[in-house]
Amino acid sequence: MNNNIQINFTLDTNNPQIDLGFEAWLDDDKFFDTDRVAAPQKISVEINDDNGEHRLKFVLKNKKTEHTQIDEAGNIITDARLSLRNVSFDDIELGQLFFEKSVYTHDFNGTANETQNKFYGEMGCNGTVELKFTTPVYIWLLENY
């Protein structure tokens, strides 16, 4: 009997010409790493569904100040960002639950103190989005939906 679940998500960029890097981690294991997100891609990882506590981490890296254009008034005109969509556990889309349970930790690309924010689907600063969950995942889903 297969006691694994499949975690899937779609990674995309709003500007494929910019070298925004990305890593994905499950607990302490990096399962995806790229120095440039150039097109939408579906990424997957399997996890054992036995009892346990887990961390799914998404890391934006290599963002530079020149990747954000700001006008004289301090308004952002253009900004390179990565998006995470269609996060699912065994083909069950997390949807709003993913945003409610994820924490985005960043320091505005070195221009401010480290902060933790809610995550709304896009990463615009070097930092980490973290989702903590437990297995068996179906019990976690029932307890949190």
Image (cartoon, rainbow, N blue to C red):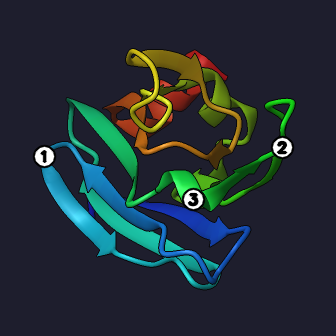
**Location of mark 1 (residue):** 28
Q: Regarding mark 3 in the picture, which secondary structure is present there? A: helix
Q: Is residue 19 among what the camera can see?
A: yes
Label 2 neighbour load within 10 Å: few <14, some 14-19, many 20+: few
Q: Is residue 4 among what the camera can see?
A: no
- As drawn, the residue found furthest toward the front would be 72
Quadrant of res 91: bottom right
Residue 1 placement, left or right of 88: left
Residue 1 placement, left or right of 116: left
Which residue is depicted at the point 51% across and 63% down? 8
Quadrant in which the C terminus appears: top right
Which residue is depicted at the point 21% across and 41% down? 50
Q: Position of residue 43 (x, y in %)?
A: 47, 72
**Location of mark 2 (residue):** 71
Q: Regarding mark 1 in the picture, which secondary structure is present there? A: loop
Q: How many marks?
A: 3
**Location of mark 3 (residue):** 66
Quadrant of res 33: bottom left
Mark 3 or mark 2: which comes first in sequence? 3
Which residue is depicted at the point 40% across and 34% down? 130
